[in-house]
Each structure stands twice: as C-alpha cells, then as structure tokens.
C-alpha cells in the first residue's frame, strides 16, 4: 500500500470531499457516543447539520461510512509505521504507554472506534470483511517493513513477528481502554524491550 498525499481537487469535487469529511467527523462522534446500533443515518444527519439525503449522496449506507472511517484510521497508522524506522526501544516504550498510534483525544477515539468495529464484526459479515481487508493492509505493510529492516528474514518469520506485534498492540490497547491494566507502564516497557531483544534479530 502506497500512501500518497491527497491531490488538489477542482471546486465541485473539493466541496464533495469537504462534505464527506464533515460527515465522517459527525459519524465518528455519533458512533463513539451511541455505538453503531444506536447511530442511524438520521442521528448522523442531525449531528452534521445535513439532511439524510445529502448524506446518502456521499455514502450509500452506514457500512460505507464505517468503511471510510476504518480506512482513514489504517492509513494514519501505516504512515506512523513507515515513520518509526523499526526503532524497537521506541516501539516498546510507545506500546507500553499506549502511544503507539499517536497521542491525544483523537487517537483515543480511533482506538475506541476500532474496538467498536471489532465487536460489530462478530454480528455483521460486511463489517467483518472490512476489518479483514484493512488488517491485511497493516499486516502486509508490517511484513514488508520487517524484511526491509532485516534483509535475511524469511517471509514466514516476518509474518510470525508481525502477528506477535499485532497481539501485543491490540491486547495492550484493549486492556487500557477497558481500564483492566494492573501494572505501571514502566514495567511493561522493560518486558516489551526484553521480548523484542529476544525475538528480533540483532541489527547490523
């Protein structure tokens, strides 16, 4: 997946894109407050101060809005993956402090929305497929980065490490968001650094 800057659009297309952004912002807030089941097109329209018809001209249904939100979150995370230069110590520190995908309220909302998507995926086959597709994007990018950082690493080894990283990242995020974590970040930092030192090859 190649991440590119958005091109400059002609006036009408730019207005459409701005309206889509406005709808996405309202839907993010609506989904965060009421969940997917409690958020219909009418609620999103009210929050965005648009008519339901205007929303349907941009998105064919609620699932299309969810798909766009998820793709934007994943695009953001792929950019961060590309920027971290496989600095394992920094990754361990960010992972333990729940800063892996960024700081601030925006990222907390992203994490909560991804949890909501995961829950909805157990009930809705379309949402499940969206989640599978975006996870595949992240997984391929993670494997490619590992093989680039460690040229002798096989695809199978890169895939195994990428899966380990996903488990650590998603598990840590879940326990933080649900306030289940029982230890201080400093302890996790030491543990994650130790794990990474054991499972990743030495850098040349």
Image (spheres, helix red, strand yellow):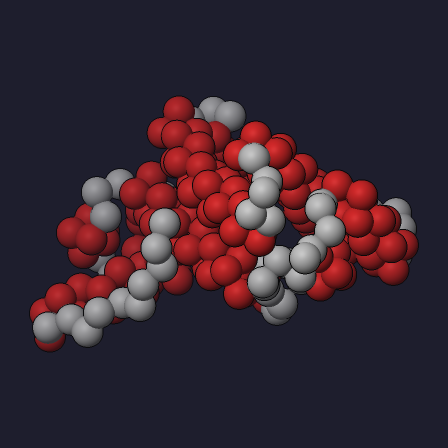
Q: At which x and y percent is residue 42?
A: 31, 49
Q: Is residue 190 depicted above or below 201 in this figure?
A: below
Q: Is residue 172 above or below residue 24?
A: above
- Give the percent coordinates (x, y) of residue 156: 57, 30
Q: Residue at x 53, y 65 (%)?
A: 83
Horizontally, is 75 left or right of 191 in the view?
A: left
Quarter occupied by residue 164? top right
Image point (48%, 46%), residue name? 144
Give the number of callouts.
Answer: 0
Q: Is residue 138 left or right of residue 175?
A: left
In the rendered structure, the answer to whether residue 94 lies left or right of residue 53 reads: right
In this picture, residue 124 sits left or right of residue 146: left
Would residue 8 be seen by someone viewing this image from the given angle? yes
Q: Vertically, is 9 above or below 133?
A: below
Work out whether 197 lies above or below 135. below
Q: Is residue 109 visible?
A: no
Identity of the residue drawn at 71% across and 46% down: 201
In the picture, the quarter occupied by the C terminus is: bottom right
* Image x and y of residue 161, in percent: 64, 38
Q: Residue 105's x, y, as percent?
A: 59, 66
């Amino acid at each position: 997946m190649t991440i590119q800057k958005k091109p400059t659009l002609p006036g009408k297309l730019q207005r459409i894109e701005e309206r889509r952004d406005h709808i996405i912002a309202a839907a993010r807030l609506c989904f965060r407050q009421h969940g997917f089941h409690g958020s219909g097109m009418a609620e999103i329209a009210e929050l965005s101060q648009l008519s339901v018809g205007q929303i349907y001209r941009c998105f064919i249904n609620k699932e299309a809005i969810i798909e766009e939100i998820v793709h934007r979150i994943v695009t953001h995370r792929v950019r961060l993956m590309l920027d971290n230069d496989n600095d394992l110590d920094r990754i361990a520190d960010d992972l333990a402090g729940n800063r892996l995908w960024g700081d601030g309220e925006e990222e907390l909302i992203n994490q909560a929305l991804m949890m909501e998507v995961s829950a909805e995926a157990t009930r809705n086959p379309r949402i499940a497929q969206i989640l599978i597709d975006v996870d595949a994007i992240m997984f391929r990018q993670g494997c490619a980065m590992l093989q680039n950082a460690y040229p002798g690493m096989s695809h199978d080894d890169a895939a195994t490490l990428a899966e380990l990283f996903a488990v650590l990242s998603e598990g840590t995020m879940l326990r933080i968001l649900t306030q289940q974590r029982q230890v201080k970040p400093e302890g996790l930092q030491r543990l994650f650094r130790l794990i990474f030192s054991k499972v990743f090859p030495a850098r040349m």
